Image (cartoon, grey):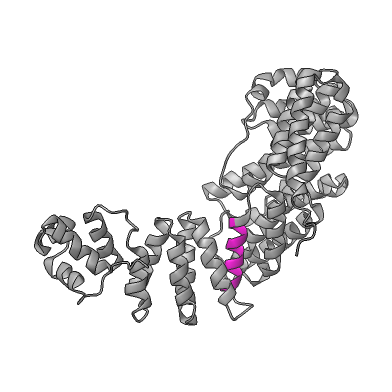
Amino acid sequence: MEITPTIQAEVQTYLKRKGLTMTEFGHKIDLNVGTVSGIVTGNRSMSVHQLDSITVGMNLPPDYFYERYIEECIEECPLNWKKISPFLYRCIELGRLDCLQRVVILLLDNPNYLPSLFEVAENVYKDGYNEAAAYLYKKVAESEKQQHSERLAICQYRLFQIKVGQDRTVNLQAAIEFAPFVDRLDEIEQLDALKDLANVYRSLSMWDKVYEFAHRMGQLGQLQYHLVHNSKRKGTEPRKKLSRPLFVYIVYAELLCANACDAKGDHAQALAHIRGYADLSWVKEKDPESLYWKKQYQQWAKINTYVNRLMSGDISVLPDYVEHIAAEKEIFSELLNVLEVANRYNVDVDHILRRFESQIAAYQESSSSDMYTQQVLPEEYVRFWYKIAKYSLNKGRYTYGFKCLLIAFEKAVTINHVLLIANCFGLFSHFKTHAAPKTQAQFQSIYEEVWEKNDQKDGFLLGGN
């Protein structure tokens, strides 16, 4: 068995091989000779900063000594947070999660380190080190003795935020796991958490859940708004920073509830919720950000009233709605509504599609780190191409229709949207006799890929234990 030399021995060997004195090496790595001498002779404890300087000076990879540092300077010494904390951050920066895990396991033997590990998790989460943050949040949550603590709830909220992406199955499980912890958050942070849960369920088209969490968000927002603006506490701001002005959570709740009602076909109730954010005369804030959001929601209320009437079958408002679309930068959620009306009520919208032909040809899926964008826009992208494919195929425009359907099908598979996958393949099957052999082969190839992927998940093993 090969014996690995200590850090001290390897530095000594390097100095001899290079013919360097401790003073010369110290000048090279910007450490004084006393520090270098203490490290080389083993008479001085070494910080990770000093270790990194030595490693750079020896022209070695930055994490070259990290495993030995754990063995020699952490495991064999009394735990010292001032020395360990910088090492944890460096492990995270360099992607050495194996080293991070070894040290965290040591620290978790002492519950006094939980608050410090939680602080590290919060810091690295803000800096975008999601994998490391997820590990830390998970370990803190597992070690938390107080099951109703706010710290545990925040850990679960962060894990939820990290897990949510484009895979619908993962997103649903993440929402189910986090939902019981929402009420344990600080009441202000609850608002963002309820918003995020509602948005995830919105992306899953689970409209009862959307309504439930949006309604809770609206009630809590109204309570907090009253506390901020009543006569005794006037001017008192929430102690935690929200991602939006406080009143926005109240009106966004109305918007989501309206969406849910429209999706379930209850257009009358949806209209009542739209009116709930059309009149914002009660909003007291006058700052530029609040005025911006007031204008946005009043505009959305006007637009969504058109949509509500269209979905109810009132086609007379279609020309006004199209003029609104023409004035917008982002038009595809509105065009999706036009296509839905066209397919639902057999309305000819060729003139509208021609008007926006160049934008449709250039349509690309938006990318963003925002949770709403990550959840809603990929599905909107699929639905748009699916609806335009359905419209085109019903019109007998088979080449273009199948081209659009192929775009929708491939993206539906990417985001693992079972309903849209089924709809895409069902629409293809309905018009299959009009598809060219190459098109049929493309659809068959994608569908077989989906089948193989799901076939491996059925969990049945012949003769296995």
Q: Tell me: 427 left or right of 107.
A: right
Which of the 4 image quadrants contains residue 327?
A: top right
Residue 266 inside the magenta-drawn segment: no
Q: Nearer the viewer, residue 464 or 34?
A: 464
Decide if residue 167 is in sight here. yes
Which of the 4 image quadrants contains residue 328?
A: top right
Which of the 4 image quadrants contains residue 213?
A: bottom right
Magenta region, main secondary structure: helix
Q: Which residues are drawn in magenta?
A: 150-162
Q: Tell me: 435 left or right of 48.
A: right
Residue 226 placed where, x, y %?
65, 65
Q: Tell me: 237 left or right of 49.
A: right
Q: Nearer the viewer, residue 295 or 303?
A: 303
Residue 285 drawn above or below residue 395: below
Outermost residue, front side: 1
Residue 152 inside the magenta-drawn segment: yes
Q: Which residue does the image show at 69% across and 64% down from the upper left?
A: 177
Q: Which residue does the image show at 73% across and 57% down from the upper left?
A: 214
Residue 117 placed where, x, y %?
47, 71
Q: Which residue does the image show at 83% across and 45% down from the upper left?
A: 262
